[in-house]
Image (spheres, grey):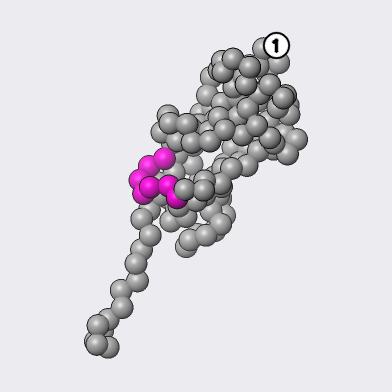
Amino acid sequence: APVVLPIKSVSVVITNANVSADSGSKIGLIANGDSTDDTTPTLSGTLSFALTQAQKINIYDNNQLLASLTSTNGTSWMFTPVTPLASGNHSFTVQVVSLLDGSLAGVRSQPYVINVLSASVPVTPVGGCP
C-alpha cells in the first residue's frame, strides 16, 4: 500500500518505490528482501504531486541520511549512489522534508530492504593446475 506523507495541507503519496540493479549477475528489479551484487543500485519511485521549491526528498539507508533530492522529473524520482554500498543489509526509506525549516513532512515510507553481496572474485588456477 502507498505511504501517505502529509506536506502542510497537501498529502504527497510515494508509490512504486523500488530498487533495481544495472550491473552484476542479476539485472533489473531487486525484490524487497532480495539480494544483489550491484553495489550502486538505483532507487526510484513516484510522488502523487511534484515537489515544490520548498521541499526535498530525503533517502535514508539504515536510518542514516544517504541523499537529498531537490529536483525530480515531475512526479518521478531516481537516485543511484555514487559511493558503492557496503556488503550487508540495507533498509531504504524515503521522506519528503521542508527546505524552509527542515521539518519532517509526515512519516517515512515503509522500508525497502535489500542485501548487498560482496563481489565474487574469480579464482584463477596457479601454474595451469585446475
Residue 76: tell me if it is visible: yes
The residue under the point 68% across, 30% down is: 47
Q: Quadrant of residue 89?
A: top left
Q: Answer whether residue 124 is magenta in the image.
A: no
Is 27 situated left or right of 47 in this image? left
The x, y position of residue 28, in whole percent, is: 57, 55
The residue under the point 44% across, 44% down is: 114
Q: Secondary structure at mark 1?
A: loop
Residue 30: tell me if it is visible: no
In the image, the segment drawn in magenta is 84-90
The x, y position of residue 46, in whole percent, is: 67, 35
Is 1 situated left or right of 24 in this image? right
The residue under the point 72% across, 24% down is: 52
What quarter of the picture does the N terminus occupy?
top right
Is 8 situated left or right of 114 in this image? right
For the residue marked with disc 1, what is the amino acid? Ser
| Outermost residue toward the right in this view | 74
> Which residue does the numbered mark 1 point to in the structure image?
9
What quarter of the picture does the C terminus occupy?
bottom left
The x, y position of residue 102, in whole percent, is: 56, 18
